[in-house]
Image (cartoon, coloured by chain):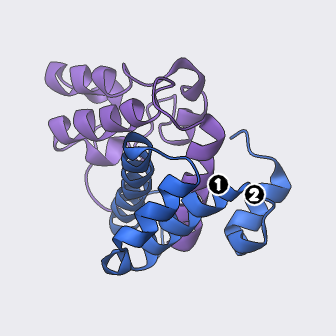
Chain colours: A purple, B blue
Amino acid sequence: MTWIKTIPPNEADETLRSCYEAAFALTPREYRQPVEALQRREGGSDSIVTSHSLIPEALRHAFATFGVLMSPDLPLTRRQHEMIATLVSAHNRCFY
Amino acid sequence: MTLDKDLANALRSDYTKADLSGADRAMLDYVAQLTRDATRVTPADLDHLRQVGFDDQAILQINLIASWFNYINRVADGLGVGRTAVS
């Protein structure tokens, strides 16, 4: 469980809810499944997306940035995105 | 995740032993250096990326994706995301 208070989507007010929705509006469709590794479908509080919920605009912009960076209109392939993510996370020995 | 298991494991243990194209190897060398110690990245590292075919927009995308995952790792670890309750 995250060590700070979090507000999952199903408990969000209108402002936060719109940020949850906007966060992944720019994410390419094929990423939305794996992105569930980032956000629990049931709206559970222990997710990296929900961890941002006390600052809704940070949530919106951090995850909108992710979506933009994964755009198929940009030069890198999905495989290259995943290699980078895997290497960085392994290097940081990120528990998540 | 679409990477095959062998590649994912190689990236987690020692990416230099993975079977990679020259371009992908150069990309990951840059990502590894950026993650380890970004202050040691030099213009020569960017020239190497250009030599294997990445243009400036691709170089920026590589940097921003690597930087974003470094960001999200720190957010997660610094706030206990994904950890079971510990004392």
Question: Which of the 4 quarters of the picture holds residue A80?
Answer: top right
* Residue nearest the observer in this picture, A21 or B86: A21
Amino acid type, mark 2: Leu
The subunit letter for the residue under badge 2 reads B
User: Of all residues shown, which one is farthest toward the right?
Assistant: B6
**Numbered badge on residue B20:** 2
Amino acid type, mark 1: Asp
* Residue nearest the observer in this picture, A71 or B41: B41
Q: Is residue B87 above or below residue A89?
A: below
Same-subunit check for callouts 2 and 1: yes
Q: Position of residue B47 (x, y in %)?
A: 44, 62
Question: Which of the 4 quarters of the picture holds residue B81?
Answer: bottom left
Which quadrant: the N terminus of chain A? bottom left
C-alpha separation, residue under disc 2 versus residue under disc 1: 6 Å
Horizontal side of A45 relative to B16 (left or right) equals left
Residue, disc 1: B24
Q: Residues within 10 Å of mark 2 (few under 14, many from 20)?
A: few
* Residue nearest the observer in this picture, A15 or B63: B63
Q: Position of residue A15 (x, y in %)?
A: 15, 23
Asked if residue B87 shows in the view, the reply is no
Q: Secondary structure at mark 2?
A: loop
Horizontal side of B77 relative to B25 (left or right) equals left
Tell me if label 2 and label 1 are in contact, CB under 8 Å.
yes
Q: Position of residue A44 (x, y in %)?
A: 45, 38
Q: Residue at x 34, y 58 (%)?
A: B71
Q: Residues within 10 Å of mark 1 (few under 14, many from 20)?
A: some
Q: Is residue A63 above or below residue A10?
A: below
The subunit letter for the residue under badge 1 reads B
Asked if residue A13 shows in the view, the reply is yes
Horizontal side of B63 relative to A86 (left or right) equals left
